[in-house]
Amino acid sequence: MIVIDDNEISNILVQKLIDYENLTDQLSTFQYAQEALDYLKAIGDDHTAFPKVIFLDVNMPQMDGWEFLDEFAQLSDKAKQDCHLFMLSSSISEADIEKANQYKEVTEYVTKPITREILQHIKETYFTVSK
């Protein structure tokens, strides 16, 4: 599981929620999208090593969520086959939601802050996140 958000406090809160919900013991957080992208590229085609869940903030400096998605789309489909990517934003803009829905890689658009209810919805709707 990966969280990509430039807000360090938000990352800490999400990490605590994920720990509290006991969703995974393999959580990586990144404040910069490029660092996360480099990490994912290093995994290559190994879908067993690729994260099953990615939370991606929309608005970030240097490389925003949209730019990340454009690069992420170029990664191996084999590697991404079991990955669920959730766009995170404090924006409830219909334009952002529609844009996110144009990417086949986006599983769902989630409004911040992430809550226990959101994590439960993801767990129950898509899978049981394995440890």
Image (tube, rainbow, N blue to C red):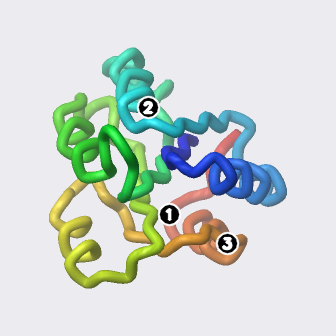
Viewer-proximal residue, 4 or 86?
A: 4
Viewer-proximal residue, 8 or 2?
A: 8
Disc ID at residue 126: 1
In the rendered image, residue 3, in percent from the top left (x then y), is placed at 55, 46
Disc ID at residue 115: 3
Disc ID at residue 36: 2
In the rendered image, residue 43, in percent from the top left (x then y), is placed at 41, 19
In the rendered image, residue 67, in percent from the top left (x then y), is placed at 23, 45
Q: Is residue 124 above or below residue 38?
A: below
- Within 10 Å of disc 2 (Cα), the crowding (few <14, some 14-19, many 20+) is many
Q: Residue at x 57, y 51 (%)?
A: 7
Viewer-proximal residue, 87 or 48?
A: 87
Disc ID at residue 67: none
Q: Earlier in the sequence, mark 1 or mark 3?
A: 3
Q: Quadrant of the N terminus?
A: top right
In front: mark 2 or mark 1?
2
Q: Earlier in the sequence, mark 3 or mark 2?
A: 2
Q: Is residue 57 above or below residue 48?
A: below
For numbered disc 1, what is the local secondary structure? Answer: helix
Q: Residue at x 48, y 27 (%)?
A: 48
The amino acid at mark 2 is Ala
Residue 31 falls left or right of residue 72: right
Within the image, what quadrant is residue 102 found in?
bottom left
Q: Residue at x 78, y 59 (%)?
A: 21
Viewer-proximal residue, 35 or 84?
A: 35
In front: mark 1 or mark 3?
3
For numbered disc 3, what is the local secondary structure? Answer: loop
Q: Is residue 13 visible?
A: yes
Furthest residue toward right: 20
The amino acid at mark 1 is Tyr
For the residues labelled 2 and 1, the Cα–Cα distance comes to 23 Å
